[in-house]
Amino acid sequence: MSVAGIVTRNWRLKVASFALALLLWGTMRLTDDQISRLEIPAVQVRVDQSDPGWLLRGAPSPAAVEMTVSGPMGDLLRAAMSEPVIVIPIDSVSESDLLFELADDWVRNLDRGSVTIEDFAPSSVRLLLERYRVDEIPVSMRLTGRLPDSLALLAEPRANLLFAQVRGPESEVDVLETVFLRSFDLGAVTGPGRFEVEVDTARLGGLMVTPTVATIIVEAAPREERVIGPLPVRFPAGALQGVESPEGDDPQGWLAEGERLALEPDSLAVTLSGAAALLDEVDPAALQLRIAVDLDALRRALEEGDEGVARAAVELSGLPPFVTGAAASDSVTVRRADAP
């Protein structure tokens, strides 16, 4: 078919289609240029807070508003699709509770050349702020377990970090008494050393802490044992001193004339355990073995027991730090006896 035929075939239909297209185009141009109003719902409200002495507490109230704009319908539709937001700038804060009237200049993602902002609903937004605080907070260790039996401490484990800098809302920093390190298991120690332990930030919520790692210093040495004694076993100060009271009478009133309290055995060897450097410094004269006794309970035990005898526990005192000790027996026999 020739070109002329293609043009002339169904020419009435083609003319009608062309006319309809021109009509639709003109209608759209007319509608696009007509001034209209549009309500854009749920426009997000954000805050640009640059005052370093304050923190925003929670979201703005309300966190979204309705914004009414006017302009050509096409521009309004494009404005709605651009997802405008309202950003409130805060350069300086004077109080913790602030109420802002929303301003047109705070709207972003909006072509202001062809679209006019009519109003906001609601027209104001409330912000709650809190002072930002930086403070030095003591650091605490949390030790679990115990050293293996082959090791003994020379000194208390210690951290090289005594204080940590904590930053955050004033209300949260004020109530913070200590910053904890993560638990450190002494049972995993195989010898003296320095061990890195992280700050337990999970307990700090949203607070920031510096530094976040500390070093725990463990001074330990192979455990040794020494035997000292035998040492005499005595009554506690203020009780009968083995034979009678220092004044020569019986303050409890239950020993017969010429009687005394005898201990069997009256002396015991003591085994000390600890690091060699500490065992070398132990003064045997500072160690004391005394019976743990309540005289009234002892009297009843002697009166109720067979042949006037009773058992009393023995306590060891005077040990230096990080040295343990045990007597050859944890108790002795107490009995009435005639004075020599």
Image: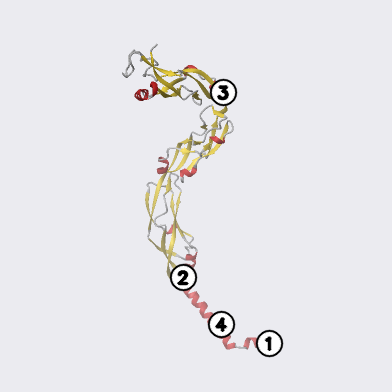
Secondary structure, mark 2, is helix
User: Which mark, by number, is residue 73?
Assistant: 2
User: Which mark, by number, is residue 135?
Assistant: none
| Residue found at the very far left of the displayed protein | 253
| Residue occupying image coordinates x 43% and y 70% | 36
> Between residues 220 and 193, which one lies in front from this camera angle?
220
Query: How would you rate the neighbour count of disc 4 (Cα within 10 Å): few for under 14, some for 14-19, many for 20 or more?
Result: few
Specify whether 131 is left or right of 159: left
- Cβ atoms at labels 3 and 4 below 8 Å apart: no
Query: Disc 4 and disc 2: Cα gap in Å?
Result: 26 Å
Query: Disc 1 and disc 2: Cα gap in Å?
Result: 46 Å
Query: Disc 3 and disc 4: Cα gap in Å?
Result: 109 Å
The residue type indicated by label 3 comes to Ala
Secondary structure, mark 1, is loop
Mark 4 = which residue?
A: 18
Classify residue 276 by image quadrant: top right
